[in-house]
Image (spheres, coloured by chain):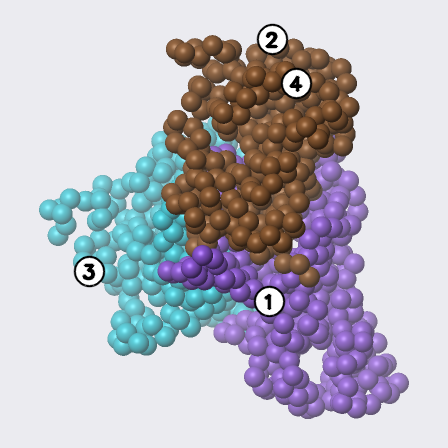
Amino acid sequence: MDDITRAIQETAKNLLLNKEVDVVVGFARGSLPLRNTPCFVRQPDDVQKLIWGYGCENNLANYLRKRPEKIAVIAKGCDTRSIVELIKENQIDRNKLVIIGVPCQGMIDRKKITRLLAGRELLEGEVKDGQVILKGREFREIIPLNQLLYDTCLNCQHPNPVLSDILIGEPVPVKENACFTDVEEFEAKTPAEKWAYFQEELSRCIRCYACRQACPMCYCEECFADCSMPQWLSKSSLNTQDNIFFQAVRVLHLAGRCVDCGACDRACPMGINLRTLTRKMVKDVQELFGYTAGIRLDQKPPLAAPISTIN
Amino acid sequence: MLILNQDQLANWLNQLIDTYKVFAPVKDGDHYTFKEISSGNQVTLNYTNTKVPPKEVLFPRSEKLFCYRHENEGIQLEEKIDESKKVIFGLRPCDAKGFLLLDNVFNNDKYQDPYYLNRRKNTVLVGLGCNQPATTCFCTSLGGGPFASEGLDILLVDIGNRYVVEVVTEKGQELLSGLNLPAAEPEAQEAARRVKEGAALSTCINLDGLKAKLDVIFYDPIWDLIHEKCLGCAACTYSCPTCHCFDIVDEAEGKEGCRIRNWDACMFPLFTLHGSGHNPRPTGKERFRQRVMHKFKYFVDNFNAVACVGCGRCIINCPVNLDIREVLAEIQGLEVRSDKQ
Amino acid sequence: MKNPYLPLPMRLVKNFIETEDNLIHTFTLEFLREEDEKSFQYLPGQFAEVSVFGTGEAPFGIASSPTEPGHLKFSVAKVGVVTTTLHQLPEGTILGVRGPLGNNYPLEEFKGKNLVVIGGGFAFTTLRSLITYILHPEHRGDYGDLTVIYGARNPGLLLYKEELAEWEKRSDINLVCTIDRPVEGWNGRVGFVPAVTKEVAPSANNAYAVICGPPVMIKFTMPVLEELGFPPERIIMSLENRMKCGIGMCGRCNVGNKYVCKDGPVFTRAQLNQLPNEY
């Protein structure tokens, strides 16, 4: 990790010194344990702020759309996949973007830690030799890293950048087959059970739109949820059905575009499981169109491709 | 000061439920939240802070203001004022302070909001002091404290298997009538004192001179960069005990409908968009500046109080870890220059 | 406790197409109950929230004057959901009105002073209220000279054409209407409001200027007024930020620490100079 951090800093410094880019978007140390935070570096002397770790959970592709300046980005596998789709949607000018790819070993899920600590506050966290050391007042726990990674990361088939100009670090091993057991379990439910599940989950929704804002692909000039002419759905949260409708349509809008990075799910302050829907969509698109989002620049998105090219 | 045994708690709550709607922290998945309880056993008091503040008990995320029905030659309006008696049980002192700040807004120099104020009048606040504040808490920097009783009707201090009960107001006194709680003996009082002493906060923010600085940095370039990672969602404002912005909409079908108010947020572009297409706060920069200015300058200008209680929810809930403590520190680090557009 | 969110029921008695592009209609509303009319005491410059039940409500400056009892007038441009619905409503529809809201033009301060009223486009609504109020026989004697400069893109876009024609005939008001480009049949002035203001050159002596119009008009007229010698304390403006509650609570219309709905919409240039430029 430290090697990667050093390499990122050095690369960023060179890019800035040589004026190849105006700004580098990466991660800095966050203000919470095991948390890193997006960081914009413009001065070569500020590159020490950049770090790499298990808390680099945000999808930085979100910051790349329609940038006026030349920009470099530190990108994990999922970030690069979003970038690929955004390039295809003409949201990113490839000529003004330098992708510093970093193979990803997975990111730590703070919700899992919260669940594990059951009310005890995490004061310090450290990852060492595949283990996470969690420290708080009067406790110290050592947990295997795998148990604390995001489910997205555990399922991820593209941890290595699919597109990069500079690659930092060694590629990590890739899982063989897509694993959709979670979706299959959900599919096996009866319609009534599915409905009850969404009712329960989305009754917590406060319509803060953190999911939408955190998604690199949710960039509509005017979101259907905000439209007033016509008004597609109620702006109030009096009725859970409207919350479900919002999520369902949001996910439909992401068909063939969602790379299952999990940003929406991570952003939700209410801890709503949003990935049930997004992953179902990812699976459907794979099955119906043979398409996996964000893999190849020359592959047309399924919903934009002429019917004849769909296999 | 009185004393309440922990095993009496559920009974007391059950008694209260007969007369009041009781809202208390309950475990909800991985976190805690204030919900109306139907039994004293549902309450969990070993929480640090709830995900969303109890502000929604008095100012719900969506509420009907009135309903209407078209009738021949006229319209019938039905006001939806909530007159029910409520208890918010086990709220933290910072959240009680949030209500004190909201009072300024909903009872301003010209108008009273009957929805909030009626609920407020009919609600008793039973607070629970914080034996162990979180590292994201900074209430003491805002004039509050883990055992501040300001805004509460009753404050409970957890001394192990018992609570020392501090009666703060008459409203609180009334809530305890019929319970015949014994006075806290010196030993219990001493224990409460020790608990309070032990509840040290690890975080503080420096507000000295902040207002004077904000007075002159509206046009400062700091705003160009400080918001940069903000995604423009409302996780911070919706989880803030003092944020009060709202929208008003109609929902109707046929001849009937209701006027509804929903939480809204200064972080959304539509919040200020004019019908003409002009937007006085067109980008994330202006919107983020508004949030900071509103809390730490405009609210001070208008009500002589900072609109922040230091609960730390915005820090915990922010999807990109944009930490208000760091934002304020950065502003404090500015060389003050004259503010020019 | 009076509930400031409850609208008074009113009947739409006239839905009048005000401009030739059909984008602005003037709505005349009558109170259903006498007691409501008595309670609705307003002055020029104030606004009200008009409810279209089932669609929502929106704030509009009151275009009628308290000297015209029995009804309220609003001139409304078709821009959003509420206004579009409003434009299509048949006469006889029951609407709701909340108000009066906000402050009014400083009529007390104006007493004994000359007034220069400058308006552009459809931002002439509360200016109509002000002019009608001052021209009323009971009030006319309280004020000095009244100069009105009113501009629109073309003659068909001027509001209140009948009244303009009447004012034209009176000797106690100096009305100058102008359009942006020459049009056949137009005998009045041609030119933008700032240039015409410069030509007319109303004296700042013992005078107040009241100005309402699109931002670009305000921007270029302001230096003209300054040149003419109007101090910022005697330039009166009305702001139009987006509003919902109208009572200083919903948080969206603020300019600095002032809420346009509650502390405005009428401000002096001097007051606005102290506030950020978020309007």
Residue at left offset 74%, top offset 47%: B302
Q: Secondary structure at mark 2?
A: helix
Q: Are marks 3 and 2 in contact (CB under 8 Å)?
A: no
Q: Secondary structure at mark 1?
A: loop
Circle 3 SS class: helix
Three-letter code, disc 3: Glu
In the image, A59 versus C275, the foreground residue is: C275
Q: Which residue is mark 3?
A: A287
- Share a chain, discs 2 and 4? yes
Residue C178 visible to an observer of this rendering: yes
Alpha-carbon span between mark 2 and mark 4: 20 Å
Query: Label 3 marks which chain's residue?
Result: A
Do marks 3 and 1 both belong to one polypeptide chain?
no
Q: Mark 4 sits on what residue?
A: C172
User: Residue drawn at (68%, 33%), measured in percent from left and top?
Assistant: C105
Q: Residue at x 38, y 28 (%)?
A: C21
Q: Is residue B191 left or right of residue B40?
A: right
Residue topped by disc 1: B81
Q: Colour of chain A?
A: cyan
Residue B277 point in image, percent of width and height: 46, 35
What color was chain B assigned in the picture?
purple
